[in-house]
Amino acid sequence: MKIEINRWNQILIEDEICEVLKEFDVLHCGWEQDSKGYIVKRPRKKKLVIILTDHGKPYEATINDLLAKTDEYQKAIDSTEDAIVVYHTGGKGR
């Protein structure tokens, strides 16, 4: 499936201009690329699609891909909160 994000930040799927319903940040530990995701509406197919990028190449993702990202985010939050506790307790931790 051909997916393109053009210079006007439009999403084209198989040459169909899709409405971007939501642009959102995507975070990657230790990676500075692929930082945006999109929920788009495909008019001809009348369905919503999740678009992420991999090394700058857009692809259709699944809801499970997004759920996996929230798991990664939570692990990073938990680890950072643990580091704050270690700092505030003088190295004793929880």
Image: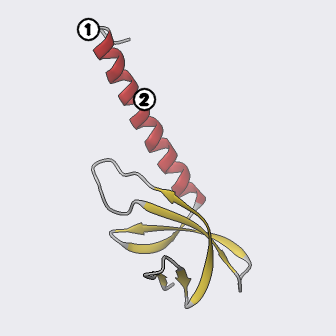
Please rate how many residues cluster around mark 2, counting C-alpha atoms within 10 Å: few if below 14, some from 14 to 19, many from 20: few
At horizontal 49% and vertical 42% (from top left) the residue drawn is 71
Seen from this angle, which residue lies furthest right?
46
Of badges 1 and 2, the one in the foreground is 1
Identified by mark 2, the residue type is Asp
Seen from this angle, which residue lies furthest front?
8
Secondary element under disc 1, as helix, strand or loop, is loop
Q: Is residue 62 above or below residue 87?
A: below
Residue 43 x, y percent position in the rendering = 71, 82
Q: Is residue 83 above or below residue 24?
A: above
Residue 25 x, y percent position in the rendering = 47, 55
Is 54 on the left-hand or right-hand side of 17? left
At horizontal 54% and vertical 66% (from top left) the residue drawn is 38
Q: Is residue 3 above or below residue 31?
A: below
Mark 1 and mark 2 lie on one chain; the one further toward the N terminus is: 2
- When asked about the image quadrant of residue 12, the answer is bottom right
Quarter of the image where the C terminus is located:
top left
Q: Which residue is mark 1?
A: 90
Residue 60 x, y percent position in the rendering = 53, 72
Identified by mark 1, the residue type is Gly
Q: Which residue is mark 2?
A: 78
Is 84 on the left-hand or right-hand side of 73? left
| Camera-nearest residue between 60 and 22 | 22
| Camera-nearest residue between 80 and 61 | 80
| Camera-nearest residue between 36 and 62 | 36
| Camera-nearest residue between 88 and 76 | 88
Residue 72 — which label? Answer: none
Residue 29 x, y percent position in the rendering = 33, 47
Seen from this angle, which residue lies furthest bottom?
15
Q: Is residue 34 above or below residue 73?
A: below
